[in-house]
Amino acid sequence: MTSKHGLRSFLLFLLPILVSVSSALSQKGTALHESELLFPLEHWHNHSSCIVEQPNGDLLVCWFHGSGERTADDVVVLGARKKVGEQEWSAPFLMEDVPGYPDTNPSMFIDPQHRLWLIWPTIMANEWHTALLKYRVSSRYSEDGPPKWEVSRVLHLKPGDEFLKTVEASLDDLAEKATTLGLEDSRTKRYFDRNRKNAGEKLYRRMGWMTRAHPIVLDGKRLIIPLYSDGFSFSLMAISDDWGKTWTTSTPLVGLGNIQPSIALRQDGSLVAYMRDAGPPPKRLQFSESFDRGETWGPVVDTDLPNPGSGAEVITLRNGNWLLIYNDLERGRYSLAVALSDDDGKTWKWKRHLERDKEVSDRQDWGSYHYPTVIEASDGTFHASYSYFSRRSEARLDSEGRTMRKSIKHARFNQEWIRQGDQD
């Protein structure tokens, strides 16, 4: 009979071989795609996930869970872990809860010191503009259950006079363009007036900033956390060069509803932010660029990539290519695609769908597959997590008559799978 010690030694011997085989598959032209729900569909609202790979190869996903979003005081941040070699995800466990307040939109990353960061907003007064941004840090997060947090702080932001100047100049420019194009109406005028007023109020511009996509680290030294405000309906970057001891802010990225930024690194060292389109039609992913390591950002412009007003994420791969995961329609979140670019986002030559409802006669029966995050794993494959709201016809009722149709989904795939394109 094999001893427990002997079995453990054998598994440790086998693990590098399995990783090598998986890496070889991803590099030698064999398409790979697999997916599963983290937990069965349920009536609770499960949304806005983020995924990381731990140094030992385990996967960790977090998301917010409760009876609603900003208006529901029972909303908490949950997590689940999938260990290397295992097929099932762990049972969800509590990552963060400020009792009596909604904790939403969590983001995670692992820094060069192999510490796990969790960044999230606590909604103080049930409106998004009252978000209080916080973060926790742990070096002990590989065991079962939640991480052992060693640092717990509020992320204090202090946008100053430069913020106000940039907002005013950007709004003047946008108002002129809107007038020239005949697009200025009562709604856009209220947007301009409201943001001019709020930008001048210290408390308003210091509160309300929220996370969505992964932070990025430049040269192993500079941490940039992409942020947005639903109060302003535009974006901002929080920057630290000392791992959270002090923070500065970039100039704001001001447009007509450009929120939830995600950052890619060009080969020349400049940065690009893609943002969700929360503004007027046409609905497109929006774009801005920085040439000074994220401190100042250029004008916000539309790309030619459709976006229905849903979160997207772009990442720079180790080979220099970019990967984008997004809802690729102007209306509806029932089509979730991944795309590859080999020219710093100038073109997206390869695209394939992780989810797509096509032949549905009743639009009310479309599913919703959205708010994705994605990483490149150590073996060269990709891992994505996203909110999965099933078609209504696929939903079922629990014993109390509540509709069970929401979960978080995980997908693993490789570049070859994307390059093959859709097969139907």
Image (spheres, rainbow, N blue to C red):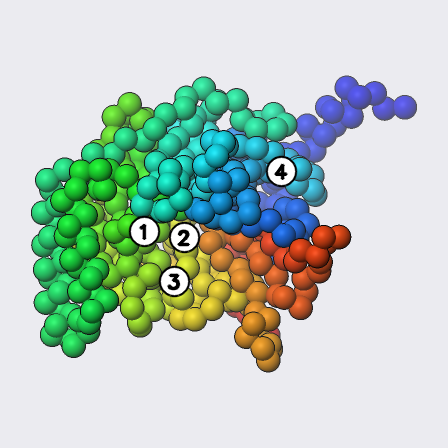
Separation (CA) of disc 1 from disc 2 = 18 Å
Q: Amino acid at mark 2?
A: Glu
Q: Residue at x 70, y 57 (%)?
A: 401
Q: Position of residue 116 (x, y in %)?
A: 46, 29
The residue that mark 3 highlights is 309
The alpha-carbon separation of the residues under discs 3 and 1 comes to: 13 Å
From the image, which quarter does the C terminus lie in?
bottom right
Residue 382 appears in the figure: no
- In the image, taking residue 316 as reference, residue 368 lies left or right, namely right
**131 lies left or right of 40:** left
**Residue position for label 4:** 92
Q: Mark 4 or mark 1: which comes first in sequence?
A: 4
Compute the Cα span from label 4 to label 1.
29 Å
Gap between marks 3 and 4, in whole Å?
29 Å
Q: Which residue is mark 1?
A: 230
Task: Say the numbered circle drawn on residue 313.
Answer: 2
* First in residue order: circle 4 vs circle 2: 4
In this view, the residue in front, 411 or 173, is 173
Q: Which amino acid type is shown beneath numbered disc 3? A: Gly
Mark 1 and mark 2 lie on one chain; the one further toward the N terminus is 1
Image coordinates of residue 324 in percent, x first then y, are 42, 57
Q: Vertically, is 216 above or below 334?
A: above
Q: Earlier in the sequence, mark 3 or mark 1?
A: 1
Mark 1 or mark 2, whichever is nearer to me: 1
Query: Mark 3 packing: few (<14 Cα in 10 Å), some, or many (20+)?
Result: many
Vertical side of 61 occupied by 139: above or below = above
Q: Position of residue 239 (x, y in %)?
A: 26, 35
Viewer-proximal residue among 254 and 287: 254
Q: Which mark is residue 407?
A: none
- The answer to whether mark 1 and mark 2 are in CB contact below 8 A is no
Where 388 falls versus 161 (above or below)? Answer: below
Determine whether the residue tagged by mark 1 lies in a helix, strand or loop. Answer: loop
